[in-house]
Image (spheres, grey):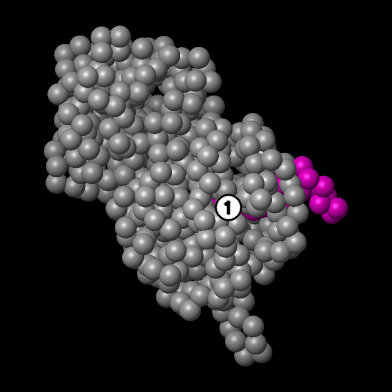
Amino acid sequence: MLRPRIIPCLLIHNKGLYKTVNFKNHKYVGDPLNAVKIFNEKEVDELFVLDIDATVEQRSPDFSLIENLAAECRMPFCYGGGVTSVEQAKKIIELGAEKVAISSSVVDNLSFVKDLSVSIGSQSVVVVLDVKKKQGLFKKGHEIFTHNGQKKAKVDLLSLVESLNQLNIGELVINSIDNDGKMNGYDMDLAEKIRSHIDVPLTILGGAGSIRDIELLISKFEIIGASAGSLFVFKGKYRAVLINYPTREEKEKLLLS
Amino acid sequence: MIAIVNYGSGNIRAIGNIFDRCNIAYKVVEKREGFSSEITKLILPGVGAFDETMGMLKESGFIEPLNELVLIKKLPILGICVGMQIMSNHSEEGVLDGLGWIPGSVKKFDKEFIPYDTKLPHLGWNSINLTRESAIAKNLDLDIGFYFVHSYYYDCIDEKDVLAFSSYGLKFASAINRENIYGMQFHPEKSHQNGTKLLLNFAKL
């Protein structure tokens, strides 16, 4: 039986592991490699690591960090952050990552997805879209942001999502800026809207605060990626740092619900 | 010694890392001359499209030595993902001929039969069911299974070549085997303990 994927998402900032709230208030969580080692032991389904500095600093990915992370990962590993060229993506795959996530470079230029698919295979191309609810009394829907939520993209979310679906990308990650770090649950309406527009694998990120939130997402969408940052690095209401992940028994229970 | 065949496709590093951790000797073969007599087993990784993978294999000049080691010397070989698919005669994904080691063709999953909103690729952890006992599949947790990412599957002409099947809309061959030739559609190099066990089982064959 194919299972939904439960995916910790780690953010790299100043070479350390950080967790944000609404993409702000960076809290230091620990050493990335150490976190990966713990997630290995916990046998996580997959791992996302996003370098949130690279695009903002207009620099290329930190290849030595990627190499070290990939060597440690015993699970499929997706790297994102600052990838602007096919050569960079190829190098990341060669270093041992399974997937390369892109965000601002696809928002700027859709044909980049095509070029990437040809060179590393479409199954390895992950598109992450950071979205925020439109501000204003009568405005509905979400808009895409890049550069850690600082820069509003001109392109319409749903039309971009449909174009990406046509291009057969490997996976689409929808990251809610409004829900980031809030631990109040996923934006289920947003998930539903995106799901109805695509048939490529979809992963939802932003807002998970409990296993119950993951359960709700999975029971509604069946085969989906449930990703979370805070949930897997914090414990308790004082947000004490503790790397955690559901046990096999807990996961089996989730799937039965 | 195990040789990981590096013709430009597949996650060589991830496989090597597992052998490093388990103290199993291996070498990465990058040139035709690298197929030396110390090699007793082969791993053929693969990621990406069929034609591109076959093209790279051809360009490397590896097809002839591989045919000799696999078909004449009968060295055990493990193909992973597209590295398995190119063991077929051909694929719907491309126009080039495959290696033709295990009769069959590679087909695309029909979206209509996939019972989820998510269609392709078949992505994530799926169970496998063995069709027979095999040393390469000893002590595996079949229910947890392995990590898959693919849109095409191997359709064997002879059912006896199917070592394990999985379900994704239809039952498909998730592992194949004929004599010394093994193919895995999933990624043992990224499948935690099950994957490590399978690679160690292969090393012990």
As drawn, which residue projects farthest toward the bottom? A138
Q: Quadrant of residue B42?
A: top left
Image x and y of residue B39, in percent: 30, 13
Mark count: 1
Q: Is residue A143 visible?
A: yes
Image x and y of residue A211, in percent: 70, 51
**Residue kind at label 1, given as amino acid type:** Asp
Q: Is residue B41 above or below residue B185?
A: above
Q: Please give the name of the residue rendered at 69% of the width and 40% of the height, measured from the top-left corner.
A: A31
Q: Please give the name of the residue rendered at 64% of the width and 67% of the height, measured from the top-left corner.
A: A177
Q: Is residue A27 above or below residue B193?
A: below
Secondary structure beneath dot 1 equals strand
Q: Please give the name of the residue rendered at 25% of the width and 25% of the height, measured from the top-left corner.
A: B31
Q: Is residue B111 above or below residue A188?
A: above
Q: Is residue A171 visible?
A: no
The one of A104 and B164 positioned closer to us in this rendering: A104
In the rendered structure, the answer to whether residue A146 lies left or right of residue A124 reads: right
Number of residues whose C-alpha sits closer than 10 Å to that of mark 1, classed few (under 14), some (14–19) or many (20 or more): many
Image x and y of residue B152, in percent: 30, 45
In the rendered structure, the answer to whether residue B148 lies left or right of residue B160 reads: right
Please check the rendered image and state whether residue B71 is part of the magenta-colored stretch, yes or no.
no
Residue identified by numbered label 1: A51
Q: Is residue A241 above or below residue A144?
A: above
Point out the stretch of residues depicted in magenta: A225-242
The one of A225 and B14 positioned closer to us in this rendering: B14
